[in-house]
Structure formats: structure tokens, C-alpha cells
Amino acid sequence: MSDDKVISMEDFKKTERELNNEAPPEEDFMGYTKVVVALSDGVVLTVVEQGVKDEHGEDEAISGIALDYEELLSVMEQLEMCKSNSHVVEDVMNLIDKVKPWSFSRIKSFEQCPKKFYHLKISKNYREPETDAMLYGTAVHLAAEEYIRDGTPVPEKYAYVKPVLDSLMRFEGEFLCEYEMGLTEDLEACGFKADDVWYRGIADLVILNREEKTAYVIDYKTSKNTRYADKGQLELMALATFKHFPEVETVKGGLLFVVCEELIKDEYKKEDAPKLWAKWLGDYKRMEKAFEADVWNAHQSGLCRRHCIVTECVHNGRN
């Protein structure tokens, strides 16, 4: 699949002429789904939604031929003035809604730097390059999933993780690998890709013990140490688990660092969920206000100098 491509309104009008009133059919290819939305007479917006998820379960990108966020809003405003296209406005709104479901990674990315978040997640005019560490982490996650779920032998180069995984398999309960959880804005359980999904999270492993009304939520980490461990991820996954499994009263979460064989753990009670949600909703509201105002301020930090790919930022060390 080619890299993301955001076209201008001028190019978009050119697309109108080229398509000559014909909208291509939906088709699946290489794990991608082509979504075609007719905007007005002969104007067609083609969006390719990547079916592959990142490590936090987020859609990697809306790629292919697409409008950027501001242009899409402009098109919406024009369509809203045309009653004959009211059904199209709803279709475009659905596309925008696909950008908005939040997750732990989106919150942390926004908090780190709203400007970088905007360029990576909203306008999508930059894309993080795949690093060796990312590829390594993906491979280890896959090996762990296939070993626990299917009994597939762990590849020799990752054999060091097998004893840690074997210790997990001694727990009693139902093993759910790469378990996807979605929540609506009313904090009700829903499908990961439901139309009204508001929050998304994927647990690397859930061990569900219904008899003891307990769930173990595990997230694998391939960092060499626990220096940057953040239990907030466990907290959010615990809150989602309470919604998806109402019988669960206790969630025991763990960040399992498979390289250094350390476990950062915490325990969450269902009765504490309202208090925990209040904190996360506050974080979400700050991100929501940025969407509403379309203001994305840069947060200068030590990462700006060498580790940020948004080169147009004044704080970027490559300038």
C-alpha cells in the first residue's frame, strides 16, 4: 500500500472530472477497505481505511485519496446548505467519527504534544517511521499471542519469553488474547468498530475467572527496563473490562516486561470505577476542547531536538 496522500481541493475537483459521475464499487484488498462516498454531482471522495491496527488498537491511518480535516469540514459546510445532499452529510460525519474514538495512546500522545498529535492523527501529513524496536515488539506480541491461544511454539529467537508466558498459563480461567473492547460515550460496552464507539482498547491478554469474579489484564512490554512504565494503561483497560464483563468485581492488571522479566502491577475494584472515570473524562475533555477550537499548541520538551518528525514546528531540532 502506498503512503498516505492528502489531496488539495484543486486536485479534488480534478478527481470530479476524471471520475465523470462514476463511483467505483467497494472492494477489499490486502487488508484494506475502500470506502466511496458521493459528495455532489460527479464529485467522489475515496477513502481507504487501513484494517491493520497499531499496538494500541487504533486505526493506523485514513490513507489513499483523502481530504485533510479542514477541507473535509469545508465540504461538510457546503453540503449542509444543500438539502438534496443531506444524506451525504451524514456519510461524511461518519468518516469524521472514525477519527475520533480515543484510547490510552491517543490521550498520552495529545498530552505529550498537541501539535504533534494533530499532524500525526488528524491532518496525517506526517507518519512515524517504523523502527526496529517497533517491529521487534510486534513480533514478540504475535509470538506470545499464538503460543497462548494456539499452542504454537515460540520462535527460537524469542525463546526467552516462554518461561514468563508459561507462568501466565498456570492461572485458572478463560484466556482471551488480543481482546478488543469498545465503549460508547454513555460508558456502555459496544463493539470495537461499532458506529457509536467512543473509546477503544485492546488487552494483550485477559484471563477471566468468572467464579471468583476476577479478571487479570496483561499488557506485554518489550522495553529493556521499566523506567517509563505507565499504569494508566492498566487503569483504562480495567474500567473497560468492568463494562464488558459486568460480573467482574476485581481486575488485577500487569505490565509484563518480558525482556527484564519484571511485572508492574495494580489492582482495581469495581466500586472505585466512578472515581477513576472522573479523572480520565477530564483528560478527554481537554482533548475534546482542542478539537472544538481547532487549536493545537506545541509542548516543548527534550524530545523536540532529535525525536520529533514534525519538522515544521519551531521547536524541532532539525530546523
Image: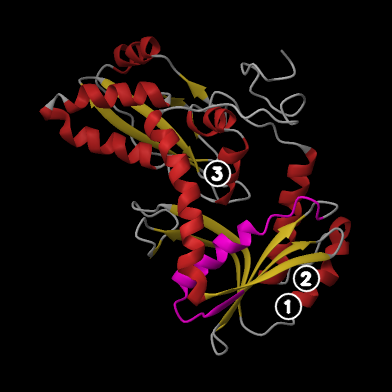
Do the CB atoms of the residues marked 1 and 2 lie less than 8 Å apart? Answer: yes
Q: Helix, strand or loop at disc 3? A: helix
Q: If you read the primary sequence from the N terminus, does the residue marked by circle 3 or circle 2 appear first? A: 3
According to the picture, the residue beneath numbered tag 3 turns out to be 106
Which residues make up the magenta segment?
Answer: 226-251
According to the picture, the residue beneath numbered tag 1 turns out to be 169
Residue 189 makes an appearance in the image: yes
Mark 2 surroundings within 10 Å by alpha-carbon count, few (fewer than 14), some (14 through 19), many (20 or more): some
Quadrant location of the N terminus in the rendered image = top right
Q: Is residue 292 left or right of residue 204?
A: left
Mark 3 surroundings within 10 Å by alpha-carbon count, few (fewer than 14), some (14 through 19), many (20 or more): some
Q: Determine which quarter of the picture holds residue 226.
A: bottom right
According to the picture, the residue beneath numbered tag 2 turns out to be 165
Kind of residue indicated by mark 3 = Arg
Q: Helix, strand or loop at disc 1? A: loop
Query: Which of the two discs, 3 and 2, sits closer to the camera?
Result: 3
Q: Is residue 186 magenta?
A: no
Q: CA distance from mark 3 to mark 2?
A: 28 Å
Q: CA distance from mark 1 to mark 2?
A: 6 Å
- Residue 211 is situated, as x and y percent measured from the top left of the image, at 55, 90
Quadrant location of the C terminus in the rendered image = top right
Residue extending furthest toward the left? 83
- Residue 238 is situated, as x and y percent measured from the top left of the image, at 56, 67
Q: If you read the primary sequence from the N terminus, does the residue marked by circle 1 or circle 3 appear first? A: 3
Residue extending furthest toward the bottom? 211
Mark 1 surroundings within 10 Å by alpha-carbon count, few (fewer than 14), some (14 through 19), many (20 or more): few
